[in-house]
Structure formats: C-alpha cells, structure tokens
Image (tube, rainbow, N blue to C red):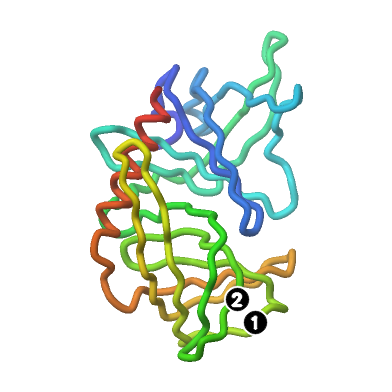
Amino acid sequence: MYLNDLEQGQKINLTARIGSEILEFESTVVDTVASTHSILAETIIKNDRIISFKGKGLLVDLMIYSADNAPKVFKNVSIKLVQLKGIIYYNISSLAEALILNRRQSFRMYVGEAVVIQCGSNHSTVDGVLKDVSNTGFAVTLEEARVEMHEGQVIHTVLNDRIDEIAKNYTFQLYGLIVRKVELENGRVIYGCKLNNPVPGLENYIMIKERIRIRDSKS
C-alpha cells in the first residue's frame, strides 16, 4: 500500500518525534495524488496556529488504524504546507510502501511515564521515563549525567497502569538487558532493553490498550 491508496475522508494519525518527546495528532485525507505517492490532508490548528511539522531533528510517521487489520505505518513522511483555492492543506508524501505492525511481536506501545530505574545488581536507583514497551522489550530515557549504564547491563523498572474502561489495575515487573544506547542532542540518553523473561499478562495488556486506542481514534 502506498499513501495515494488511502481514501478521501479516511482518518490518519501523525506521530511526531523530537528526541524522546512524542506527540500524536489526528487528521483526515482530503485528496490523493498518485503521481507523487502523496495525499492532501486537513491541517491541525493549535493556539490559533497551524502546526507545520517543521523543526531540527523532527521525524513524523503516519499511521492507519483498523479494527479488523493490523496497524500500518508510513515511516518518516515528508510534510509541506500547500494552499489550494485559498485553503491550506498538508501535502504528505512517501515513496515507500506502508509497513504492517505485528501486534503480537513488534508493536511498541508508547508509555511516557516517570519511573524509578534500578541499575545492575546493586540497589542504586535513578529517576527516568519509561518511553515504550512491547512484548519483548522496553526503552527508558534518562539524563546522561545521572548515571552511566552500558550495553549488557541489567536494569529493572515497574510499569503501573489502570485501565478505567475495564476497571482494572496492572503492575508489571520489567527486567531487561540493555542492547542499545542512543545519545540525544538534548543530553538525554535512550536505553533499549530486551526482556530477560516473558512477562505474564503484558501482551494482553498491550492489546487491550491498542484496541482502546483504535476505538478512540475512530470516534
């Protein structure tokens, strides 16, 4: 599937990333342009200004959610503001085809919650942010100056959440082996971790959260 295969009136989600910060927006397809693999979409206005999706280090993914099929994502789309007949639209383009997100394995759910992280086998802890979690791993973000961690080190944190829609509390103990370190321009560091062992109930929790998100995006 290419971007121009989308339908007029179809809802799309734009996920903008700058470092560890993630913002999500919803828009609607107005028209498609097959010759450039692009679409025209409604602009998003905040504080009486159109969000331009311009900025150093800004990356934007376009996602499509369906209640029946796995989500699809167009990675690193290009977004420009264009004016047609006095109306400003987003011109969103991508030469690549959409990627299908595997719900059971590769889907990473954004969390963005403050957590306490235990480093190594000792009891020293540091404050950080649980960036995202999947059935096989998780990522945390923290200030470089706070602690030095390295690949191969084991870290531990806890994911606590309550899903009001089903009136249920969740607590997951996450033990992970650091497999990736990414230094950001703002001095923060992202550590990607592989779960040491499967976490009971985590996969089902992620799927419930995703179903709620898909429902909300369609309403």
Q: Residues within 10 Å of mark 1 (few under 14, many from 20)?
A: few
Pair 2/1: label in front: 2
Q: Residues within 10 Å of mark 2 (few under 14, many from 20)?
A: few
Q: Which mark is residue 147?
A: 1
Q: Quadrant for the N terminus, please.
A: top left
Q: Quadrant of residue 201?
A: bottom left
| Image position, residue 207 (x, y; %) | 29, 48
Q: Which mark is residue 126?
A: 2
Q: Which mark is residue 81?
A: none
User: Which residue is at 41% across, 60% downward?
Assistant: 133
Q: Disc 2 versus disc 1: distance between alpha carbons?
A: 7 Å
| Image position, residue 61 (x, y; %) | 52, 44
Task: Identify residue type, mark 1.
Answer: Val
Q: Quadrant for the C terminus, please.
A: top left
Query: In this rendering, is residue 186 above or below 204?
Result: below
User: Which residue is at 37% across, 70% downward?
Assistant: 173
Query: In this rendering, is residue 145 above or below 202?
Result: below
User: Which residue is at 32% across, 41% downward?
Assistant: 167
Element at label 1: loop
Query: In this rendering, is residue 218 above or below 61?
Result: above
User: Which residue is at 48% across, 71% downward?
Assistant: 192
Q: Earlier in the sequence, mark 2 or mark 1?
A: 2
Q: Tell which of 95 and 205 is nearer to you.
A: 205
| Image position, residue 93 (x, y; %) | 55, 36
Q: Are marks 2 and 1 in contact (CB under 8 Å)?
A: yes
Q: Is residue 49 left or right of residue 198?
A: right
Element at label 2: strand
| Image position, residue 90 (x, y; %) | 62, 27
Task: Identify residue type, mark 2.
Answer: Val
Q: Quadrant of residue 214?
A: top left
Q: Quadrant of residue 6?
A: top left
